Image (tube, rainbow, N blue to C red):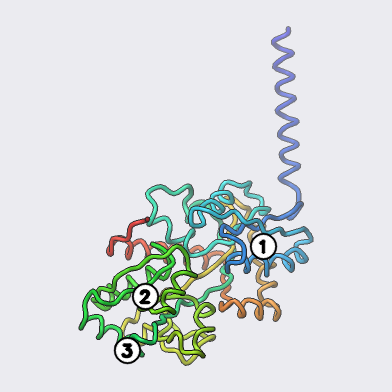
């Protein structure tokens, strides 16, 4: 009798649990605060983009949207937090090229799969890398640089913000495409790398337009080319590396919002619509342009395809040139 009664109690408990779970699942989205995780330190472009979007997104969703910085492991710590979060749309990631397409080919062990563990929502912005040189380097075009590098093999160096950074991969892609060998000087961050190029201790650097432009009027740096396939709207007179004879040369930093993989389609659709409403606002466009970036939107499907394409592109280059993590 006791065992029968125990079984009945257990069955009732399971039924109540199922009903409660169903009630939670049936709650309309959003039903609580939304976390937008920035996996990098405050004041960087990733963090600033998240903080530009969050206030208006909060208005449209009718719930607070809080930016949470969870930096570390070149963006992997924050990304893993989101990948493992409940797939209900209340935890989002402001991801970028590093943790969504590059790191997987640089690290022996990744805590998540950038393709399988996320539901892409939309691209948000992109900024092309620009090739800048110290004015003492006698080059004004990519063709000049390639000719000098071939005439003086191993004599030209380039600064980067670290191994596996977009600037590092851009320079290695140029090495490979042009058949030259420039020497890599990795720094611990973008600021010291740029400072050493300005000082003349390093010859060149692939960096963001926003970082380089303040040093153009004084002649402390010279812009040579932009690394995107098309000319940048921010620098329409600056030729692309592709125009110089390397038609597939494309290195841009990009950012986009993703959610955990099992997030319901209707939630992804709602978030996509509301984030794109924010991005369409004139004040949003102005603020993002002030960061030296351009708004780039997409459908969830386009973003998913883009992540796969970028992942494959960098995996091929990293394998071919033998880039190894620090």
Viewer-side residue, 306 vs 149 = 149
Identified at 60% across, 56% down, the residue is 259
CA separation in Å, label 1 and label 3: 50 Å
Q: Are marks 1 and 3 in contact (CB under 8 Å)?
A: no
Q: Is residue 148 visible?
A: yes
Q: Is residue 29 visible?
A: no
State the separation of the CA atoms marked 3 and 2: 14 Å
Determine the CA span between mark 1 and mark 2.
44 Å
* Point 77% across, 58% down: residue: 63
Q: Which mark is residue 271?
A: 1
The quadrant holding residue 317 is: bottom left
Q: Position of residue 190 (x, y in %)?
A: 48, 69
**Residue 265 picture location, percent across and down:** 62, 57
User: Which x, y percent locates residue 70?
Assistant: 59, 53
- The crowding category of the residue bearing disc 3, from other C-alpha atoms within 10 Å (few below 14, some 14 to 19, many at least 20), is few
* Image spot of residue 5 (x, y percent): 74, 13
- Give the label on residue 311, or none: none
Task: Give the left or right position of residue 265, taking residue 134 as reference.
Answer: right
Quarter of the view holding residue 193: bottom left
Q: Secondary structure at mark 2?
A: loop
Name the one closer to the observer, 91 or 200: 200
Identify the residue position indicated by label 3 in the image.
138
């Amino acid at each position: 009798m006791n065992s029968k009664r125990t079984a009945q109690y257990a069955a009732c408990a399971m039924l109540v649990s199922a009903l409660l779970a169903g009630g939670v699942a049936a709650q309309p989205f959003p039903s609580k605060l939304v976390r937008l995780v920035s996996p990098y330190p405050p004041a960087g472009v990733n963090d600033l983009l998240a903080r530009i979007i969050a206030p208006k997104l909060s208005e449209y969703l009718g719930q607070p949207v809080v930016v949470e910085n969870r930096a570390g492991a070149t963006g992997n710590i924050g990304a893993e937090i989101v990948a493992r979060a409940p797939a209900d749309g209340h935890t989002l990631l402001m991801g970028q090229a590093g943790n969504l397409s590059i790191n997987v080919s640089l690290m022996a062990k990744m805590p998540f799969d950038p393709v399988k563990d996320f539901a892409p929502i939309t691209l948000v912005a992109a900024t092309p890398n620009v090739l800048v040189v110290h004015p003492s380097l006698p080059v004004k075009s990519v063709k000049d640089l390639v000719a000098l590098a071939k005439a003086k093999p191993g004599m030209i160096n380039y600064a980067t913000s670290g191994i596996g950074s977009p600037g590092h991969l851009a320079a290695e892609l140029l090495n490979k495409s042009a058949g030259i060998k420039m020497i890599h000087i990795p720094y611990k961050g973008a600021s010291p790398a740029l400072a050493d190029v300005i000082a003349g201790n390093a010859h060149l650097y692939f960096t963001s337009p926003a970082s380089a432009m303040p040093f153009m009027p004084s002649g402390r740096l010279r812009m040579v080319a932009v690394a995107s396939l098309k000319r940048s709207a921010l620098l329409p007179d600056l030729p692309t590396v592709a125009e110089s004879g390397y038609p597939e040369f494309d290195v841009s930093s990009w950012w986009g919002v993703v959610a955990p993989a099992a997030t319901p389609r209707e939630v992804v659709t709602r978030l996509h619509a509301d984030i794109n409403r924010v991005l369409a606002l004139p004040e949003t466009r102005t603020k993002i342009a002030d960061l030296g970036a351009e708004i780039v939107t997409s459908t969830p499907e386009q973003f998913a395809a883009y992540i796969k394409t970028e992942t494959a592109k960098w995996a091929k280059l990293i394998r071919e040139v033998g880039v190894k993590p620090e």
